[in-house]
């Protein structure tokens, strides 16, 4: 089916979105706006026809069936307000808004359109294998998730590492646990004095008693070169521990290890009954392919063929509530109940 898509913003992540629409065969119907002349030129240099590129949304909004918001996070609220009121289906990059109050106001503006938040890892093939393991009970009851997302990279002007990086793994933890946390605590630091965190240690407490611990930062080493932002380094690891085994994802090397292990009481001691490690094969997913997976899920939801991958209540408002609690916990130095 032909689609007319309006992409709002063409910064660092813009080319990845363009490549994703191309891989789905839908780039002919893509229109892009960005207030920056350099961004518009970059977009045209990548082959988007000159009359599909503009400065303001009004130029193409009437044409568009779907709108993708790829502006800086602190602009999402002002950009999305009129779009929601117009009833357009919306894909909003993560995090949906800069504040909880903005997230609630956007949710309240929704009519019956589809709104998906851009939680990339829900469409990542390795995360999807682990999610299937969890849903099918092969890891048993989930006990603990530990995730590390850090490395030397630019400190963004629109958000800190909690809003930019931790959100990915908080969402992934919530998705694996199939629940939102009931409490959080966090410590953060702002070494650059930007008013945004550049280091954060976060703990999430789930209704089942399970825990998650997430370390993020742009001031400590990352083991690998980043595959999205040139010149940056990244460690991007996500580990799930359940009563019947564990899963370790290394997103930078594209490796997944599934541990088949259960502790058993033998001669008065809890010992691991280790039935081995599996390394399932998954084709390497380039970032544009993962984004294409998110878009395909978005289109399926728009067509009523599938439930939403990352909806506004859980991934927009729910996530904003968690981020707000993390910031309050860090400033008050205590645990916040949600
Ligand atoms: N899902 C992911 O893995 C992922 C990865 C990177 C970025 N992101 C998210 O995507 C968004 C954009 O990130 P980026 O790295 O491309 O940012 P960026 O700062 O590199 O680019 C943002 C672009 O938006 C334009 N812009 C500014 N105000 C605008 C407005 N009012 N309307 C339209 N365009 C406007 C700017 O001119 C710029 O070209 C952020 O919310 C970020 O968190 C998500």
Image (spheres, helix red, strand yellow):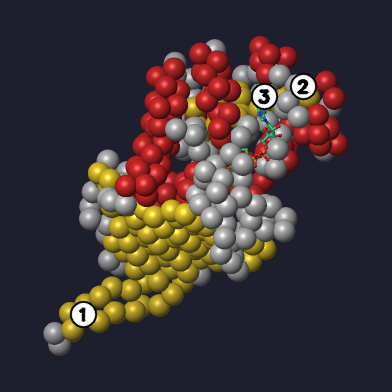
- Between marks 2 and 1 in the image, the one whose residue lies nearer the viewer: 2
Q: Is residue 299 visible?
A: no
Query: Which residue is under mark 2?
Result: 54
Regarding ligand 1, which quadrant of the image does it lie in?
Answer: top right
Number of the label disc, if any, that sits on residue 122? none
Percent x, y of residue 166: 47, 50
Considering only order in the chain, which callout, 2 or 3, is on the residue closer to the N terminus? 3
Position in image of residue 119 (x %, y %): 51, 42
Return the residue at label 3: 6
- Outermost residue toward the front? 193
- Distance of label 3 from label 2 (alpha carbons): 10 Å
Q: Residue at x 56, y 18 (%)?
A: 83
The reply, left or right, for residue 280 in relation to residue 314 is: right
Real-space Cα separation, disc 2 to disc 1, in angstroms: 64 Å
Q: Are marks 3 and 2 in contact (CB under 8 Å)?
A: no
What x and y, as percent, mark residue 207? 23, 48
* SS at badge 1: strand
Residue 270: give its label.
1
Q: Is residue 25 above or below residue 226?
A: above
Q: What residue lies at 28% left-to-right and 45% top-to-bottom?
A: 336
Residue appearing at x 66%, y 27% in the figure: 8
């Amino acid at each position: 089916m032909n689609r007319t898509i309006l992409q709002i913003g063409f910064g660092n992540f813009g080319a990845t979105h363009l490549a994703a629409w191309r891989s789905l065969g839908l780039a002919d119907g893509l229109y892009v706006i960005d207030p920056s002349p350099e961004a518009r030129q970059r977009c045209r240099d990548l082959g988007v026809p000159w009359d599909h590129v503009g400065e303001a949304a009004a130029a193409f909004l009437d044409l568009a069936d779907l709108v993708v918001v790829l502006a800086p996070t602190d602009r999402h609220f002002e950009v999305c307000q009129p779009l929601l009121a117009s009833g357009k289906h919306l894909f909003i990059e993560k995090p949906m808004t800069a504040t909880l109050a903005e997230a609630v106001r956007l949710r309240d503006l929704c009519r019956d359109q589809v709104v998906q938040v851009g939680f990339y890892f829900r469409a990542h093939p390795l995360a999807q294998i682990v999610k299937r393991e969890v849903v099918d009970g092969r890891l048993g009851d989930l006990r603990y998730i530990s995730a590390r997302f850090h490395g030397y990279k630019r400190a963004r002007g629109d958000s800190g590492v909690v809003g930019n990086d931790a959100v990915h793994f908080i969402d992934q933890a919530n998705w694996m646990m199939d629940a939102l946390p009931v409490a959080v605590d966090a410590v953060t630091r702002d070494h650059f004095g930007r008013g945004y965190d550049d280091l954060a240690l976060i703990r999430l407490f789930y209704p089942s008693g399970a825990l998650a611990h997430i370390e993020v930062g742009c001031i400590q080493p990352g083991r690998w070169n980043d595959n999205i932002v040139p010149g940056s380094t990244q460690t991007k690891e996500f580990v799930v521990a359940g009563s019947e085994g564990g899963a370790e994802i290394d997103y930078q090397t594209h490796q997944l290890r599934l541990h088949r292990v259960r502790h058993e009481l033998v001669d008065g001691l809890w010992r691991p009954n280790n039935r081995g490690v599996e390394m399932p094969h998954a084709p390497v997913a380039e970032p544009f392919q993962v984004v294409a997976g998110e878009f395909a899920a978005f289109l399926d939801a728009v067509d009523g063929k599938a439930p939403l991958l990352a909806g506004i209540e859980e991934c927009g408002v729910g996530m904003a509530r968690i981020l707000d609690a993390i910031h309050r916990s860090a400033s008050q130095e205590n645990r916040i109940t949600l």
